[in-house]
Amino acid sequence: MSADDLPDPTGLPGLPHPRETTRLIGQEAAEAEFLAARAGGRLHSGWLITGPMGVGKATLAYRIAAHLLSGRGGAESLDLPEGDPDLRLIRNGSHPRLFVLKRGPNDKGDRLSAQIRVDEVRKLKSFFHLSSTDGGHRVVIVDAADEMNPSAANAVLKELEEPPADTTLLLISHQPSGLLPTIRSRCRVLRLRPLEPAPLAEALAQSGVASDAPEALAVLAAGSVGGAARIAQLDGRALYAELVGLLSGLPRMDRPRAIALAESCGGKAAETRFPLLLDLIDLLLTRAARAGLAGEPDLQGASGEARLLVALAPDARAARRIAELQQELSARARHGRAVNLDPSALLLDMLLRIEATAAETAAA
């Protein structure tokens, strides 16, 4: 297998690639902040675009890149005409003055590396040399900066400390706290927020994903378009409704129903349904702990969810116990996946731990 045959690590399954997305929905404040900085002569050489996964960070990076590469300074919008030659080259992945730093092949070349390695960063030198003859502005997108190993991170830091002339580096980060402090200090930050139900539904429609329950999807996906698309495509709403229904009988759980739910995530479903249910369990416990402190939520991910959350964490003490359980089960899930535990057995064990905790809370 050649490197060209490997999947692109910068795209999300079931959605158009960020470079092909025509509009960025719900992140007008971040776009306006960049435009104001440029109009005011404060175009930093390094920008750190942060926010949860799937809220449009990469789309914003490509829109900024198109804006800079086209030379349209002082504009009130990042939008470009559909026939713009720079925009066309970017969408084709062939713009000579744009370099995307991302994970490359592993040592065997048969799959993607788990990290962005320094070998990929070294390709920047060739890019800077070749693109210098063009004479225009150059842009580097790092997607995602969180994936850089220490050697790659230090190599990128050197570029931020002494950036080549007429060059802008756009670093995408889902968890900026994990980056080198010196990288963060060299960049101006653009923060993107989770989307509310209405813009989330609009963004999904733009991506060709049907949604008849944007409020529930906004809850389950935490305002992430990528997360909402995954949930919609895998019928995650029905899976969450089944989880809520099962746990609504606590402190005693319907064991046959719990076994059936766990077994539904084994076999062929282990690749997609299993990790989705792990995420939904994590979400439910997180929301329950929050409800114990802040009260019943305004929006629900499934019918009856609000009552269940309050029942699981009726007060601050119970909320702390649920938060501890969430951390415990999250660690258990990571370990189980790392050592390839049977998905059904792992899920059933997690459900039984929730039952035991609910019984402890009820007896207290």
Image: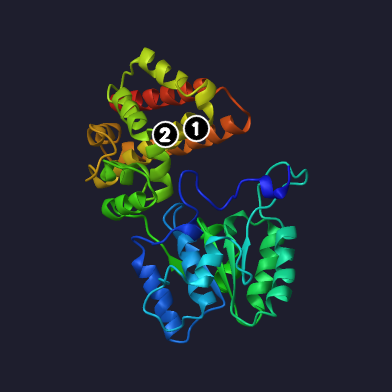
Vertical comparison of 109 with 45: above or below: above
Q: Which residue is mark 1?
A: 272
Horizontal side of residue 247 vs 8, given as left or right = left
As measured in the structure, the alpha-carbon distance from the residue carrying label 1 to the one carrying label 2 is 8 Å
Q: Position of residue 48 (x, y in %)?
A: 52, 67
- Check disc 2 and give the amino acid type: Leu
Disc 1: CA contacts within 10 A as few (<14), some (14-19) or many (>=20):
few
Q: Which of the two residues, 21 or 214, is positioned nearer the viewer here?
A: 21
* Marks 1 and 2 in Cβ contact (< 8 Å): yes
- Check disc 1 and give the amino acid type: Thr
For the N terminus, the quadrant is top right
Vertical comparison of 346 with 145: above or below: above
* Residue located farthest toward the top when viewing the structure as drawn: 256
Q: Which residue is mark 2?
A: 234
Q: Residue at x 35, y 41 (%)?
A: 220
Element type at marker 2? loop
